[in-house]
Amino acid sequence: MSVGAGPSIGILGAGAGGLAMAVRLKQAGFHDLTIFEKSDGVGGTWRDNTYPGAACDIMSHLYSFSFAPNPEWSKTYADQPEILAYLEGIADRFGIRPHLRLGTPIAEARWDDTARRWRLTAETGELFEVDVLVSALGMLNLPAYPDIEGLDDFAGTTFHSARWNHGEDPAGKRIAVIGTGASAVQFVPEIAEPAAQVHVFQRSPAWIVPKALRPYAPEEIEKFRRSPLAMRKHRWEILAQLERHTSIHKADARTAERQSWHHGLLRRQIPDDEDLRAALTPDYAIGCKRLLPSNTWFPTFTRPDVELVTDPIDRVTKSGVRTADGREREVDTIILGTGFRASEYLAAVDVYGRDGRRLRDDWADGAEAYLGMTVSGYPNLFVMYGPNTNQGGGSILFVLEAQAHYITRAVRTLARRRVAALEVRASAQRRFNDRLQQAMDGTVWLDCHSYFRAPNGRVTTQWPYPARRYWWETRRLRTRDYDLLPR
């Protein structure tokens, strides 16, 4: 960048994080920015996940940005088309589309210490250079495929829920669903009605709580249109309620209270089958894996054409799925509801920092960053929705907005001080992560194996404090924690 000019910024991903980042940079006067997006439009995970019943499990007015409130939300929990429309509206309203390079997935990012710039290589072979690189790829962008013998040999149709095959009509089909995570909880009740038979293969049950789903009344929507203050108040009431009821410690009384919500819902919706209730009850602390709100999951298993299978899968055959007891269930379609490679941050991009160091190697034992955003050895690299920024309860959009503010401050510091780069000090990164891991003691996340944890057992995804504390800790840039690299 030339003296007096702002830095050029490359943003990876045009999902919610990438859009928030672009909006805040433009509002701060930085317009030399490019968003590299692999798909043909904005929206990120809300563009990719189009399975039946796809919806948010955070209430709509909190699952939105404070700089782009939406009085028109139709219901308390918005579904995928409405959220995608909201994100597309942000791209239009704030003039983001001219900054998009669609169909351009970046395969490699390499720091040039001489030029003090990032050199990007797209999968197409195209080359780009930027002063600052922001990854807004998030956690839920790479589907996780199970390692099951014979899966590739199945003669029917197989697809992952995040890559839904809309050409495959479930009507009259025998369907095997592998996995019972967040996506399956939403799409299984939707396909059960038209399908001839659905077999749901469960490795471990999820904690389910009631979902306060209802449409907003016309008078409520009109009030939000007329009064931004009323809409803001509603937003903060949702956040306060979530943080009041969120429990991340096993010894917290709220943990037992929330578990009672699951048991109460289960007794009301499956009153006559004790064995089925037992099969749908986890043996780990609530919150150890993702907590799922649903009013339709439990009743689905009372249908005669839906079977919950708890025996482990032995292998997939050409005609179906065989379990460890030797029984084979013949099916036409296999749907993988097996989630995402959530703890493999930046897995889609090969990142090289100073002196040729490689981020995949540095994160081989689990990802870590300072404030979940910056990594020592990688100047001018910022990661949104990075290590230890996932919420035990709350909206990730609240966190993404805080991160967009923080990164914009960093870019402003580069421009004002006329330095080439910021690099977080290794000592600051270590202090932050030591404190973070100490705070994990006694949390529910240590009670089971989940994508919240790296293979070595360290919790690498979760923020062990209230969301508002993250906002507080990122409200300003502490330059004493960074080395400022001259041009």
Image (spheres, rainbow, N blue to C red):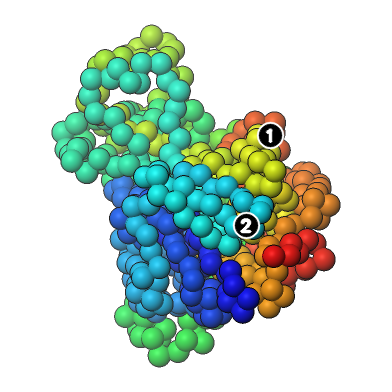
Q: Residue 365 carries which label?
A: 1
Quarter in which the N terminus is drawn: bottom right
Q: On the rendered structure, is 187 left or right of 13?
A: left
Residue 315 visible here? yes
Q: Residue furthest bottom?
A: 226
Residue 110 vs residue 256, the one in the foreground: 110
> Looking at the image, is 418 positioned above or below residue 450?
below
**For the residue marked with disc 1, what is the amino acid?**
Asp
- Of the image marks 2 and 1, the number of the one nearer the N terminus: 2
Residue 405 visible here? no
Where in the figure is residue 307, as x and y percent of width and height?
Answer: 34, 29
> Looking at the image, is 96 positioned above or below residue 454?
below
Question: Pointer 2: what residue?
Answer: 115
What secondary structure is marked by label 1? Answer: loop
Residue 292 vs residue 390, the one in the foreground: 390
Q: On the rendered structure, is 169 left or right of 314?
A: left
Residue 487 in which image quadrant: bottom right
Where in the figure is residue 324, as x and y percent of width and height?
Answer: 44, 12
